[in-house]
Amino acid sequence: MLFENVDAHLKLRSQLLQLFQSNRVPHALLLSGKEGSGHFQLGLFFATLLLCKNVENGPCGHCSSCKKMLSFNHPDFHFSFPIHLSKSEKSEISADHRSSFVEMIKEYHCIGKQTWYAKMGNENKQGVIGVKESQEIIKKLQLKSYEGNRKVLLMWLPELMNLQASNKLLKLIEEPPENTILIFISDQPHSLIQTIYSRLQHIQVPSLSVDHISQYLSNYFIIDEVEANSIAKSSSTNLHRAVSLFLSKENTKEYLSLFIKWMRLCYTRNISDTIDWVSDFSKMGRETNKDFLTYSLELFRQCIVNHYQINLAGLSPEEESFLLKFKPFINHKNIIALNEVINDAYYHLERNANVKILMLDVSLKLYKLVRVK
């Protein structure tokens, strides 16, 4: 089944199964973890379990309910997720984008914000779960079950509910209709308003191992074992990032070219060309900007690791060739400061800082840091 990679979290799957078998299923469950940790797949697994007609050691995979879940056509299963709100484009509730959302899941077999925002047409715009969505959820869940069993809502990224939507759903979360289960999948659970967070039963989902990510790639995509392992090592234990790296190999080449140019500008302290670089970088989209910063951190990490006679791993030949020349500029004297500068930039990008001003400031700081020996 599509959700079989939850085998990576056998203990959590057993925990969810025990809750089901002992009739202790919470009416509102929060599965939280980093993006690409498998928490979304666990949520789908649990939803399928709740609606399955022949549960044994998990969803049977053969009954009519499981088949409908596999194609995302079960009438008692509902998705909710952040969208780009726009009255003029008739984009106000999740249902307006459901077909695109399901299409993305089927293509990637996982999920991530950058991919979703890009699919909606603007990766630079933050998604929102608005008040009309909360009204639609209440309306749907008050209806009787189509198949006479449970109704299940799976909300992805509930932390992106605005305050009005959050307050609207408080009563539903506290006292949902009979046989209604709410499953929340969060990357940043502490960003939920406290009145909602306190009403959810919380299960923390750890990151996947490199081996599990590698096996996942081998299971779902045409890829040899060596390449799967290489991509898994480059993914920073983020399943979605691993799949994105595989499906968009050209992006990695672009990131490397962009990184090489940036580092050369920082070393030569060419301010006019740096300003041009920053201007071009700002046009790439905020989520791509964030992804590039993550990529930069990984290259810094690879450099410092190689100083201790540990072979470079998970890199393309082009990346390895460049880093072998570049690594003398990344050392124990500057690695902490470099990490802090890039992580701070990522933090401010998430909070809608002006990309040009931010990245010019970062570049000026790197002018000094890359010359530390």
Image (cartoon, helix red, strand yellow):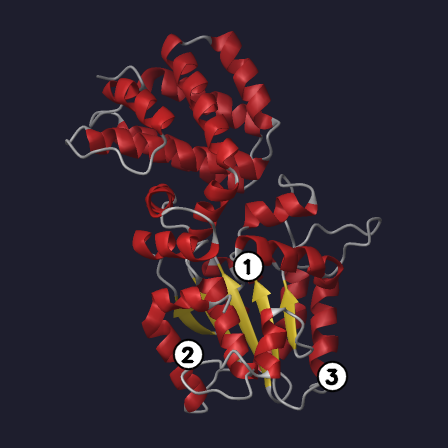
Q: Position of residue 82 (x, y in %)?
A: 64, 56
Q: Position of residue 164 (x, y in %)?
A: 68, 62
Q: Position of residue 350 (x, y in %)?
A: 52, 42
> Tags 3 and 2 in contact by the CB under 8 Å rule?
no
From the viewer's side, name the closer residue of 28 and 144: 144
Q: How crowded is the residue under tag 3: few (<14 C-alpha within 10 Å), some, or many (20+)?
A: few
Disc 2 residue type (three-letter): Leu
From the viewer's side, name the closer residue of 217 and 368: 217
Residue at the spot of label 1? 159
317 in relation to 144, above or below: above
230 in relation to 99, above or below: above
- Residue at x 34% of width, y 72% of height: 10
Q: Is residue 287 visible?
A: yes
Q: Position of residue 19 (x, y in %)?
A: 42, 84
Q: Secondary structure at mark 3?
A: loop
Residue at the spot of label 3? 143
For marks 2 and 1, the one nearer the N-term is 2
Which mark, residue 16?
2
115 in relation to 45, above or below: above
Query: Nearer the viewer's eye, disc 2 or disc 1?
Result: 2
- Image side of residue 292 versus residue 117, left or right: left
Query: Nearer the viewer's eye, disc 3 or disc 1?
Result: 3
- Residue at x 34% of width, y 31% of height: 299
Q: Secondary structure at mark 2?
A: helix
Q: How many marks?
A: 3
Q: CA distance from mark 3 to mark 2?
A: 26 Å
For marks 3 and 2, the one nearer the N-term is 2
Query: Nearer the viewer's eye, disc 3 or disc 2?
Result: 2
Q: Is residue 195 visible?
A: no
- Residue at x 54% of width, y 63% of height: 193
For marks 3 and 1, the one nearer the N-term is 3
